[in-house]
Amino acid sequence: MGMGGMGMGGMGMGMGMGMSMNERSFMSALQASGINSAQLTLLLPRELVQNILVPRGMMMEIAQRSQSKIDLGPEGPQGMIQVTLSGQMVGNALASLLLQEKVIQWQQMQN
């Protein structure tokens, strides 16, 4: 179930400030190579994902904010579901942080 997949277009603004010409060239080549693309797989509570995050549009919002693609995978250990983040590393890190915040909020509501 894909939920994002838009590139990190605006994140490069300001890149190069304080960098030498060689550093800017290196960073441009690094971005062009796609080496900054990554996947990160998380295990999240199935109940949270299927009953709250997806139906309320929170997964889509996180995908849009982070510019990462979010895919739901198979169930993992009991009560957990695989969530795969794909995109640039910084976007995946942001998506992971936002999802972790949702898990903490959900856990606090359970107690």
Image (cartoon, rainbow, N blue to C red):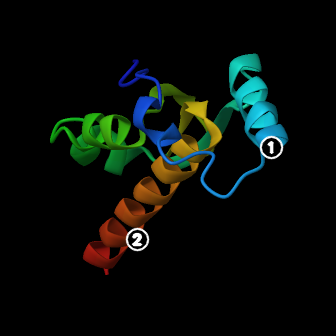
> At 27% across and 34% down in the image, what residue appears?
60
At mark 1, the secondary structure is helix
Above/below status of 3 relative to 26: above
> At 64% across and 41% down in the image, what residue appears?
89
Left or right, 85 with respect to 26, comes to: left
Decide if residue 78 is in sight here: no
At mark 2, the secondary structure is helix
Decide if residue 27 is in sight here: yes
Name the residue that disc number 1 marks.
23
> At 72% across and 21% down in the image, what residue appears?
34
Label tally: 2
Q: Position of residue 63 (x, y in %)?
A: 37, 35
| Three-letter residue code for mark 1 | Glu
Name the residue that disc number 2 marks.
104
**Image quadrant where residue 62 sits:** top left
Q: Position of residue 31 (x, y in %)?
A: 69, 27
Q: Position of residue 95 (x, y in %)?
A: 46, 47
| Three-letter residue code for mark 2 | Ile
Mark 1 vs 2: CB contact within 8 A: no
- Lower position in the chain sequence, tag 1 or tag 2: 1
Task: Bin the neighbour count of mark 2 within 10 Å (Cα to Cα): few under 14, some 14-19, many 20 and up.
Answer: few
Q: Position of residue 16 (x, y in %)?
A: 63, 46
